[in-house]
Image (spheres, rainbow, N blue to C red):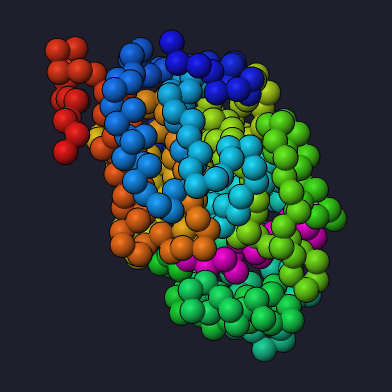
Amino acid sequence: MPPRLHSGFRNAGLSLLLLVAGSVGAGAQPASPAPISPDTRRIEETVERAKDLPNLRSLIVTHNGTALAEQAFGGARLDRPTNIKSASKTIMSALVGIAIERGVLQGVDQPVASILERSIPDEADPRVRQITIGHLLSMQAGLERTSGRNYGAWISSGNWVRDALSRPFVDEPGGRMLYSTGSTHLLSAALTRASKRSTLELAREWLGEPLEIDVAPWTRDPQGIYLGGNEMALSPRALHRFGEMYRQGGTIDGKRVVPESWIRESWTPRTSSPFTGDRYGYGWFMRDMRGHTAHYAWGFGGQMLYVIPSLGLTVTMTSDPTEPSREDNYIGQLHALVADGIVPALLPKPEDATGSIQQTPIP
């Protein structure tokens, strides 16, 4: 039997799992995945393929909490914090869900202006008061992006919250997806003002303590608000444990961390990426892999967390955070490691298959 990953996964179990089917929405699935003996040969071959990717720094694969692969590359360590870049947005989504559950925030339909009113410039477009917490989570605020070519100017401004709120509208609130770190930074500011506590404090108490992971301080804006949606530092093991908690419907070691209903909300597709076409919910991307829905967090350079509840699968990959993940289709290669290597190792073999799911040979 493969070794257990570490004590955090001993009680992972086969708890209530969540599955999004297609683009209709998410719902709780009462049944656990059918027992499958993983194809260890495929996993070993996938690890060997991973070694050929010079930017890759770690790979962790667990099936129902049991480790199938734990590898560090290029001098990295699985227990050493690394910059998870925009995978931070997925962590921010969890914090918002917990805040709503605890009454710190009213809900996804709450206008963010009700919390950040004093940061709205007098000359701001009136539509800024229509932007809700949900719009920020799903990247549908309608405001000009602060990411991409606008990122440098945004973080050079003297007030990141005010600057994001004063951006011109390029779509209506609730319109198309406009991927913007400014949107998740507004969520960090809203959490800070509504709770009167820093985002770091909330992350440590609401996630760090129950998950038994370290959350180190990270970048703050000129007003001292922790950057929402970028620059968080978590170890590969810590990021993986966060993913395992989501795979188990918001619990870890029998402890409730995130409301199960929030995971359903987060994994309900609300828009789609203009870059990849993949569906997007509240801080999570979604794509189909061999007939199963993969929910994933994605950070610049290839900081990846995949959760496929229908297979009991969680995969974490971290990469050199200074190299773009879309160059040379690196992100495509990471997706392929999961879709073409790891997922088939958990599908029924042809002689055992029932229905339409068949094991597909590795190309």
Q: Can residue 89 be seen in this view?
A: no
- Say above or below: 23 vs 253: below
Residue at 57%, 61% in the rendered image? 136
Residue at 70%, 36% in the rendered image? 213
84 and 266: which is toward the camera: 84
- Whole-percent x and y of residue 63? 43, 23
Q: In which quarter of the image is the C terminus?
A: top left
Q: In this view, does 157 lie to the left or right of 66?
A: right
Q: Is the magenta stretch mostly helix, strand or loop?
A: helix
- Say above or below: 200 vs 72: below
Q: Does the magenta stretch include residue 4?
A: no
Residue found at the far bottom of this picture: 123
- Whole-percent x and y of residue 66? 49, 19
Q: Quarter-wise, where is residue 6 in the image?
A: top right
Q: In this view, does 221 lie to the left or right of 145?
A: right
Q: In this view, does 179 lie to the left or right of 119?
A: left
Residue at 34%, 28% in the rendered image? 44
- Say above or below: 307 vs 149: above
- Say above or below: 167 vs 312: below
Q: Does the magenta stretch include residue 192?
A: yes
Q: Quarter-wise, where is residue 177 in the image?
A: bottom left
Q: Is residue 183 visible?
A: yes
Q: Quadrant of the N terminus?
A: top left
Residue extent of the magenta highlight = 179-194
355 and 170: which is toward the camera: 355
213 and 52: which is toward the camera: 52
- Whole-percent x and y of residue 220? 74, 65
